Image: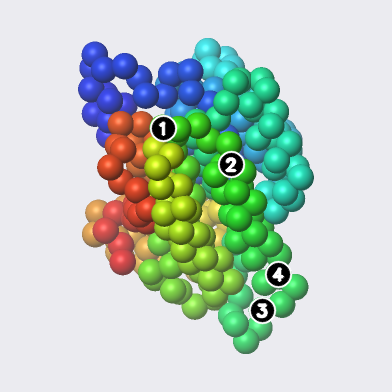
């Protein structure tokens, strides 16, 4: 899908001069969403947790192509740090229109073997982080804006070994619907996008950690009716639509998984 299909020729760009905050914007799906929004002349704040080099690479690439972006370091579960990022964006750019919350961690372990300290870390980042980021978004996003949480098709697939991750993303999806209903009358759309297997660094690490990554990848492809692994652009297409001209989808979990269930 092209931007022209999302936004027909001659129509004013729904992203131009808007302000977006993208958590997890230094890599994978978050990075591509940040880049695509910037291509449409949206001013983008990229939130990253640890890898300043990658975050600065994204900012540099956006700047070189004529876009406006900057990077801010924060743990998404830290309410003071996230509040400061939102406040800085308001002061620098005049307001906030789009929030895409893509930051997450993905450990793999069976329920019987999982270290409960690791469970706490997953819930702290993935679930508490959703509370923190969405709280600031609910307080600060301007009327007509959009809030998108990046969930996962794992909430349907419920694959063994992904219990903590699936639980955290199921909680995210519930919070998305609750927030959509709480923001009634504000003109702000709130949705979750749940990607299926997507060609990212996270997927590569998962495959490499398995006993037979090639066979695992082939199994994933065979389970997808469209017969391929998704790309970050596939997911960014959906996010751009939901933050652009699509205004009648609200309080939904949109599965972008090539038909995988």
**Which numbered tag is attached to residue 139?**
2
Mark closer to the chain start, 1 or 3? 3
Q: Quadrant of the C terminus?
A: bottom left
Q: Earlier in the sequence, mark 3 or mark 4?
A: 3
The residue located at (49%, 50%) in the rendering is 149
Q: Earlier in the sequence, mark 1 or mark 2?
A: 2
Could you tell which of marks 2 and 4 lies nearer the N-terminus? 4
Mark 3 lies on a secondary structure that is loop
Q: Residues within 10 Å of mark 3 (few under 14, many from 20)?
A: some
Residue 243 percent location from the top left of the image: 39, 35
What residue is disc 3 on?
114
Q: Is residue 7 left or right of residue 28?
A: left
Q: Are marks 1 and 3 in contact (CB under 8 Å)?
A: no
Looking at the rendering, in which quadrant would you find the N terminus? top left
Q: Nearer the viewer, mark 2 or mark 3?
A: 2
Crowd class of label 4 (few under 14; some 14 to 19; many from 20; radius 10 Å): few
The residue beneath circle 4 is: 120
Q: Which residue is mark 1?
A: 144
Whether residue 207 is visible: no
Considering depth in this image, is 42 or 218 the residue closer to the camera? Answer: 42
Secondary structure found at label 1: strand
């Amino acid at each position: 899908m092209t931007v022209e299909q999302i936004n027909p020729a001659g129509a004013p760009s729904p992203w131009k001069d808007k302000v977006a905050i993208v958590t997890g914007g230094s890599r994978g799906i978050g990075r591509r969403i940040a880049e695509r929004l910037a291509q449409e002349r949206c001013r983008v704040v990229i939130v990253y947790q640890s890898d300043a080099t990658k975050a600065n690479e994204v900012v540099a690439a956006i700047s070189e192509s004529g876009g406006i972006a900057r990077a801010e370091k924060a743990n998404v579960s830290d309410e003071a740090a996230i509040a400061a990022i939102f406040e800085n964006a308001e002061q620098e750019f005049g307001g906030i229109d789009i929030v895409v919350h893509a930051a997450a961690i993905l450990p793999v372990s069976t329920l019987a073997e999982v270290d409960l300290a690791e469970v706490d870390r997953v819930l702290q980042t993935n679930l508490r982080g959703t509370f923190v980021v969405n709280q600031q978004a609910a307080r600060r996003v301007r009327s007509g804006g959009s809030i998108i949480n990046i969930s996962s098709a794992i909430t349907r697939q419920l694959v063994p070994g992904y219990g903590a991750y699936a639980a955290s993303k199921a909680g995210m999806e519930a919070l998305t619907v609750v927030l959509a209903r709480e923001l009634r009358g504000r003109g702000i759309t709130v949705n979750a996008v749940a990607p299926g297997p997507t060609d990212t660094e996270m997927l590569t690490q998962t495959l490499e950690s398995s006993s037979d990554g090639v066979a695992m990848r082939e199994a994933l492809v065979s389970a997808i009716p469209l017969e391929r692994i998704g790309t970050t652009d596939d997911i960014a297409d959906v996010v751009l639509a939901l933050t652009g001209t699509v205004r009648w989808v609200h309080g939904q979990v949109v599965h972008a998984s090539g038909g995988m269930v």
